[in-house]
Image (cartoon, helix red, strand yellow):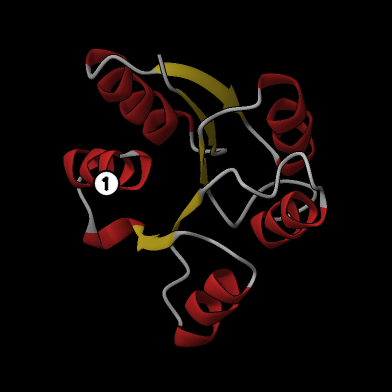
Amino acid sequence: MQKILIIEDDKFLRELIAQKLVKEGYNIAEAIDGEEGIKKVKSEQPDLVLLDLILPGIDGFEVLSKMKEDSSLVSIPVIILSNLGQKEDVEKGLKLGAADYLIKAHFTPGEIIDKIKIILK
């Protein structure tokens, strides 16, 4: 069973996505800030990380950078899910190694799950 780590400080959104993923047969791990996110990536070794950028403490860009610098984590795909929709933010996220960049307002939870399925195939 594939495991997805959701790093998201918005409780409502995190729980909504988690519930949908569980229904689809995925295992879920959750983190509410960047520091916990990095710890969980290491301890849980998820198949994919869904990463918010605006987090308490260290932000999502830093979480992504740290993952890509660590040889044991570098191959884990990361989908950024953010309210930051500026071209520079999107480019920065993709340059840092994100597999995809989804702007929260543009995607329903169902569409986010579809993106996850495509990347995990």
Residue at far bottom of view: 88
Res 103 → quadrant: bottom left
**Image x and y of residue 2, in percent:** 42, 21
Q: Residue at x 75, y 21 (%)?
A: 43
Quadrant housing the N terminus: top left
Q: Is residue 85 above or below residue 29?
A: below
Total numbered labels placed on residues in the image: 1
Please identify the quadrant where the C terminus is shown: top left
Name the amino acid, label 1. Answer: Ile
Mark 1 surroundings within 10 Å by alpha-carbon count, few (fewer than 14), some (14 through 19), many (20 or more) = few
Left or right, 13 with respect to 118, comes to right
Which residue shows up at 32% across the image and 27% down it? 16
Between 115 and 15, the one lying in front of the other is 115
Where is residue 3? Give x, y as percent.
Answer: 48, 22
Name which quarter of the figure residue 113 lies in: top left
- Coordinates of residue 38 in the picture (x, y in percent): 76, 37
**Which of the 4 image quadrants contains residue 18?**
top left
Q: Position of residue 10 (x, y in %)?
A: 49, 37
Residue at image position (41%, 61%) is: 100
Residue 110 drawn above or below residue 45: below
The residue labelled by disc 1 is 118
| Label 1 secondary element | helix
Residue at image position (34%, 56%) is 104
| Residue 87 to residue 11: above or below | below
In this view, the residue in front, 50 or 76, is 76
23 relative to 118, above or below: above
